[in-house]
Amino acid sequence: MQPENEAPPERETGSVVELLERIGSVVLPIGVALYAVLYIGVEEIYGVFGVSPQQAGIDQAVLFGRLSGSLVLLLLVGLPTLGLIVGLLWLLDKITLGSVGRVVAAVRRHPWIAALVAALWCGATYWGFFSVFAELDLTIMLIIAVSLGVLTFLVPFRLLRRKPVGRAGMKLLVGGLTGLGLGFLLIIQLLTAAVDVHGTGQSGLLLDAVGFQNQWAVLQNPEDGKSLYDGRRMMLLGESEGTYVLYDCDKLQTFRRPIEATQLAGIESDPELPEDFSCGSLAEEDTTE
């Protein structure tokens, strides 16, 4: 039996299990928060075309599969990037004869400094939030982000650092807000890419990564096989409740058509379009008439 005045044995450090626990405590909240924000990003993509993901036939199961695949791709890109950053910091520490390591250790020993760094980092999350949901000046966004970090996170983070449980909770909050911030930045890129597809008909790698299917087809009458809409190709956004959701690139219009009254011909994914191709040619003619 262990004496009462004897300190408990120290936990073994450097083990594989401990390393996995540390990685999981950071990656898991980032991944969960990023997944949640990516759901908003998919709604923004289809919102450019005037429909919701559900109207395009993308239910929760399909969305989960697409976003899970997106997270896998982000993980494949993020791990080498993180490894490169760690390697550069290690090299910088060696070049400076350990000065970088001593600075990091000093920051971790001073709770107020560590809490301030974490607070400013979490405040930066709202930079991406305001970029998506509000139109603010860059200086105003910077002031708001710094103020939110200092006024709302600094003291709570300092109090959380008093105990191991609090430090774990702080790490969870920082990881979650980091995932939200990355997600908001990704939404901005997705929204820009969706606007490009709406205007040019050309999809990029980023939209492909989140599962946006850039499919084109010629619509035909199933009874006699005659082409509809002068044989122009339409972008197939999806199908739901017995209807196709289609985007007319030439007229910049999104419409629905019953499946039983529509036959798809010449289906093509990511067609090669001329570099100077743009949508809205017939829409411009309608406005000039």
Image (cartoon, rainbow, N blue to C red):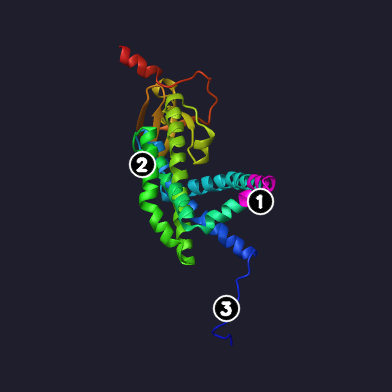
Q: Is residue 204 above or below residue 35?
A: above
Q: Amino acid at mark 1?
A: Gly
For badge 2, the amino acid type reads Ile
Q: Amino acid at mark 3?
A: Ala
Q: Residue at x 43, y 39 (%)?
A: 187
Indicate which label's residue lies in the foreground, 3 or 1. 1
Q: Residues within 10 Å of mark 2 (few under 14, many from 20)?
A: some
Q: Position of residue 24 (x, y in %)?
A: 55, 58
Q: Which residue is mark 2?
A: 144
Judge whether residue 261 can be spotted in this image: no
| 219 in the magenta segment | no
In this view, the residue in front, 152 or 108, is 108
Q: Earlier in the sequence, mark 3 or mark 1?
A: 3
Instruction: Please identify the quarter of the rendering in which residue 40 is found.
Output: top left
Crowding near the residue tagged with mark 3, few <14, some 14–19, many ≥20 C-alpha atoms within 10 Å: few
Report the mark closest to the observer, 3 or 2: 3
The residue labelled by disc 3 is 7
Q: CA distance from mark 2 to mark 1?
A: 36 Å
Q: Which residues are magenta?
A: 88-101
Q: Secondary structure at mark 2?
A: helix
Seen from this angle, which residue lies furthest top? 289
Give the CA distance from mark 3 to mark 1.
Answer: 32 Å
Query: Of helix, strand and loop, which one carries label 1?
Result: loop
Quadrant in the picture for the N terminus = bottom right
The x and y percentages for residue 3 are 57, 86
Foreground residue, 36 or 267? 36
Q: CA distance from mark 3 to mark 2?
A: 47 Å
Residue 30 at x, y percent in the picture: 49, 52
Secondary element under disc 3, as helix, strand or loop, is: loop
The residue wearing badge 1 is 98
Residue 88 image position (x, y, % from top left): 65, 44
Which mark sits nearer the N-terminus, 3 or 2? 3
